[in-house]
Image (cartoon, coloured by chain):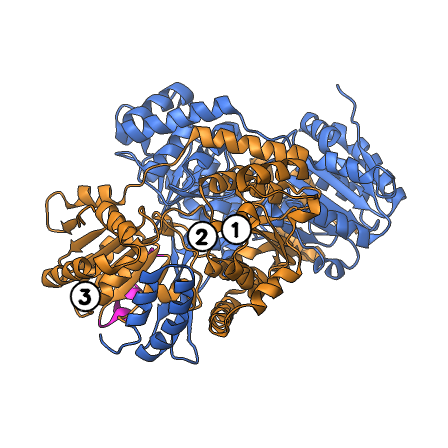
Chain colours: A orange, B blue
Amino acid sequence: MDELSLTRLDSGAADFEGRLAALLARGEAADARVQAQVAEIIRRVRAEGDAALREYTRLYDQFETASPKDLELPRGELQAAWDRLPAATAEALEVAAERIRAYAERQRLESWSYVDAQGTRLGQQVTPLDRVGLYVPGGKAAYPSSVLMNAVPAKVAGVGEVVMVVPTPKGETHPLVLAAAHVAGVDRVFRVGGAQAVAALAYGTETVPRVDKIVGPGNLYVATAKKLVFGQVGIDMVAGPSEIAIVSDGGSDPEWLAMDLFSQAEHDEEAQAILISPDRGHLDAVEAAIRRLLPDMERAAVIRASLSGRGALIAVRDLDQAVTIVNRIAPEHLELAVADPKALVGRIRHAGAIFLGRHTAEALGDYCAGPNHVLPTAGTARFSSPLGVYDFQKRSSVIFCSPSSAAELARTAALLARGEGLTAHARAAEYRLRDRP
Amino acid sequence: MDELSLTRLDSGAADFEGRLAALLARGEAADARVQAQVAEIIRRVRAEGDAALREYTRLYDQFETASPKDLELPRGELQAAWDRLPAATAEALEVAAERIRAYAERQRLESWSYVDAQGTRLGQQVTPLDRVGLYVPGGKAAYPSSVLMNAVPAKVAGVGEVVMVVPTPKGETHPLVLAAAHVAGVDRVFRVGGAQAVAALAYGTETVPRVDKIVGPGNLYVATAKKLVFGQVGIDMVAGPSEIAIVSDGGSDPEWLAMDLFSQAEHDEEAQAILISPDRGHLDAVEAAIRRLLPDMERAAVIRASLSGRGALIAVRDLDQAVTIVNRIAPEHLELAVADPKALVGRIRHAGAIFLGRHTAEALGDYCAGPNHVLPTAGTARFSSPLGVYDFQKRSSVIFCSPSSAAELARTAALLARGEGLTAHARAAEYRLRDRP
């Protein structure tokens, strides 16, 4: 078994900036071969519809459909999966769904309008998307929590139809995933996956309806397909490996912090877990806790690889400097394990989700705190937001001039239009200087 | 001179669906050669910084910089351009900027939080982007209105620094564009354009600062570059040719409608202008007006090409059917030229901007009504929104558990985490069942 090797950085060191940059650097996954392969899958599903979709499903999932209608999971199966759940599991899923729903309700955008001083009514009309596709990975890495986090906000937004796709290798379904789909109110489920499922959702086939936006996690083929169909449909962010940064003032139990770092690192060997503290003795204590607890972890090998490859304990001058470094990292998850987290949170400019205080474990947010666990990774919190109800709504601007307000605006518009050489614009505006219908 | 050929469709015809689909079909501009060329430009600017940027600027813009600092337009030049404007133009720009600002203020997202029944504080912290890049095309197609529409919402959002890039072929600047940048509060201007300017904004050079998001229109090279740097930075939508759909009940002046169609068509030979009405005689009258007015238009050739290639007059059964077709089109701009537009607007599910009533010319919205003129094209209003203040803000989820609320959430989280095989998540949650720090 490999040794754990933990990177220790000190903000006072001369090479700190360079080492931090190296720690945060991400490989760029532009794989031309995968791209070509995915483009061909999309082309064929678009051209041949169900026939291509069934062929790829046979090839990649070893799942044979007797007829196109077998691509769809019979409606009763979600309810059936739900009915078979142990009571405690059903209750936990219900609690999580209810909390995700309650938070999502607060995010809903509402239409508004006002009349300005000249008599023009101006506003914004908010509407839900008609139909959304939710990609759910199959096999053992299937996460019911991810079904809730993607489907519940769509339903809260008022999306007309939520269509889930999930590969069922050799026909095998995942009971918890189906039960989560039931509790989240997913409308239809198709047993397809990979780039072919993304293509079917983007363009529609005889059996799979075309959607307006595709959300949900997936492997490199799924992510590449989503990028390629973007524009034809909307997509959510393409997520990178998961990350956490923890700021500790030294007062938290080192074992708690070690376990929070583990819970990030166990996702994936590429996951990143970073602890920042002004207390060097505390960093030593957390490192000792990591070394003590790691051997007992079920996913010790993944955690060891992740912490050795991408983890770090960073000593800083003070909490102010910790905040500066956090804003530089723009982490997906941020824990503020400090005595007075409210004093720091307002200075955090870039983070996907912020967990305040010693008791707010990041893992609570992954399942049931309420806010979404689909969050911007790889520094994209600099310019993007958690998945939310607003991702399933869109806005139309609304403008309603009175004859007199139109005339007033027309003067300004015509002058500017002529400045741009767009004389039909100018004339269209000037017609509204007259009072005819 | 070519003849105008106007497509007439009738919703009652057997082939209507197919003809409408053909009318709306868009070529897909995936040009592998351009993509490779742009990727190489980005690679070089990223690796070589200012040196590559200056070389490309010399090559493509015939603009020679004596030193890297010449890449930046001296700060005084915006003010100087403003001071030289004719009074009427200055006033029009100021009126437009003020109206865009007033509408944008209404869009600003605010942070919120609440404490749930168990004592967990949950919220959403809204922050502006640190730095935004605004691409402005150079030469004769430079649009001061576009500078206002992109820069003003960024400033209203509270973006720390708005950095504009604009190519200056042979060193030539566009006075109205600089004056608009002044009035919009643009912070810095660099005299670069093309894919090299996008690359400089995305990665930074010695002279050009790295930004967090790039917005603004551009040619195929600029659009391709924006797509390629997406993820490294945020981008706005990649816009297609402009479009309008007009629903008329027959009561509007045919010349007004003809001119509104022209004002869309004059943008570009690929622009699309569609009129929908249940009144066939009225469609004839508008067609006659089009033929009568077209020869006098300054941009007659562009309008003729656009209307012949992509325009249409569509006869429908009634206004209900018009609404159905509009939702199918999901137009960038929609005019409801009807007696009671309020009765229709709530049934419009997909449109970038909706202009209500006979007096609200679309051209007013292009310049000074207030709502943004950067709108989703090519049917993307099905899933996206006008550019707005919200595009320059992002959200962080905030979660703050009390010891007792953490313990309560921990039970649910641990159960679900074990269901997903993520035992470090479960243990991290379970630590919060104890009352230690």
**Alpha carbons under labels 2 and 3: distance apart:** 32 Å
Report helix, strand or loop for mark 2. helix
The three-letter amino acid code for the residue at tag 3 is: Pro
Kindly state the secondary structure of the residue where label 3 is placed.
helix
Q: Classify B216 as above or below B434.
A: above
* In this picture, residue A250 sits left or right of residue B55: left
Circle 2 or circle 3, nearest the eye: 2
Instruction: Give the residue number, with chain letter if any, for mark 1.
Output: A215
Q: Earlier in the sequence, mark 2 or mark 1?
A: 2
Q: Residues within 10 Å of mark 3 (few under 14, many from 20)?
A: many
Question: Is mark 1 in CB contact (under 8 Å) with mark 3?
Answer: no
Residue B250: % across, % down: 84, 49
Q: Nearer the viewer, mark 1 or mark 3?
A: 3
Name which residue type carries label 1. Val
Q: Position of residue B369 (x, y in %)?
A: 59, 52
Residue A140 badge: 2
Q: Quadrant of the C terminus of chain B?
A: bottom left
- Rendering quarter of residue B338: bottom right
Same chain under badges 1 and 3? The reply is yes
Above or below A350: residue B29: above
Instruction: Identify the residue at image location x=44%, y=47%.
Output: B184
Q: Quadrant of residue A425?
A: top right
Residue A254: numbered disc: 3
A253 sits left or right of B79 in the view: left
Q: Which mark identifies residue B107?
A: none
Asked if residue A15 lies left or right of residue A25, the reply is: left
The location of residue A30, given as percent across then percent down, is 40, 33
Q: What segment carries the magenta color?
A: A339-351
The relative height of residue A83 versus residue B180 in the rendered view (above or below) is below
